Amino acid sequence: MDGVKDPIIWRVKCMVGRERQMAFCFMQKFLHLQKFGTKVPIISAFALDHVRGSVFVEAEKACDVTEACKGFCDVYVNRTSTVPVAEVRSLLSTRAKPFEVSPGTWVRMKSGNYKGDLAQVVSADDGRKKVLIKLIPRVDLHAISKKFGGAIPLKGAAVPAPRLISSQELEFFGPHIESKRDRQTGDVFEVLDGLMFKDGFLYKRVALSSLIYWGIQPTDTEILKFSSSPSIKSSADDMDWVSGIYGHNKKRNVPREPDMKKSASSKDKSSKASNLKGSTSTENCDDDDDDAQFNLHDLVTFGRKDFGVIIAVEKDGFKILKGGPEGSAVTVRKQDIKKGIVDKMFTAVDHQNKSISMNDTVKVLEGPVQFV
């Protein structure tokens, strides 16, 4: 019980993050000077986890606190104040152990486009008070494609509905996709426009203060969504392409496994029967990895970020004119080609900042091809 005869507790301002260190320095100074017969005129010093930027010193007078602070550069002696007697009890009372957020914990977002959305903690950094979470994306791939084409993003656009994004959808952004390994978890993510994707989910590193993690009880429907992934869906289902990504909706029907086997066998037979001759050949060639077919003059991606146009069909691969300032021609094996890409993925803007793409009719106003 505190009383009027108890020593005064002084609150001394210090640098944020140095509270524990300063309390230790007071104790170390007390023990060090005690060996030489000099007594530091304080009774105790302590720091509290929930009070940042302050260290507490128990002493009789203010001058005793000033004397004890001599030689310390991380404290502000001129910003010393007394703790009222009525607040001493609550200051020194024990507090319940804070809730620890561990991997697998269910949380909800406090604000932003994902306000109220369920998320799951993947990893936690207790020192920085940050966590890596995964949640169902609210991403407009159509807007991202326009952004890469030079269009100006619209402010105040409607927030997309949450849905998982398959890896097939991301492959159409081939040159814009980067693979990065997270240092903390070691997982590899596909990064598109600064957004991290893996297995259809969006991964974000956020501050712990931006999450609600007390008493979260997800519904069965929400848990079911987190247990599903585009990569484990039935191959007989229709796979939606990027919704309206290049001006109109496209959908590709994925054949069932028996049909795929028949198709593969028929392709092998036709491939054996045909002879590829020089760069004038226009026959389809099979990709060993995903049974994709490529024709002469097709746009394809290969390597990490490279893309180009097939200009010749050779015995063991294709001759491709690379996109870029250098415009060099390289020979690429069939198995090294990832995917064909749509012409309209490559867009530009006119002098009015309007997007133009392949097969669009334009009028040349100036330059060497004016009036042509």
Image (cartoon, rainbow, N blue to C red):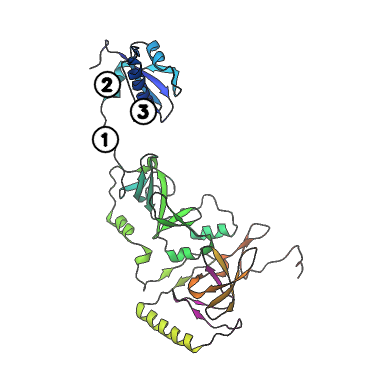
Q: Tell me which numbered mark, 2 or 1, is placed earlier along the sequence.
A: 2
Query: Quick one: SS at disc 3?
Result: helix
The residue at which mark 1 appears reads as 97
Q: Is residue 180 above or below residue 107?
A: below
Say which mark, if any, is on residue 20: 3
Image quadrant in which the N terminus is located: top left
The residue at which mark 2 appears reads as 89
Q: Please name whichever residue, 160 or 123, is drawn nearer the observer in this view of the structure.
A: 123
Image coordinates for residue 156, horizontal then vertical, percent: 51, 49
Majority secondary structure in the magenta region: loop
- The stretch in magenta equals 275-302
Is residue 145 part of the magenta span, yes or no?
Answer: no
The residue type indicated by label 3 comes to Arg
Few, some or many residues within 10 Å of mark 1 (<14, 14–19, 20+): few
| Residue 179 seen in the current view | yes
Is residue 293 part of the magenta span, yes or no?
Answer: yes
Few, some or many residues within 10 Å of mark 3 (<14, 14–19, 20+): some
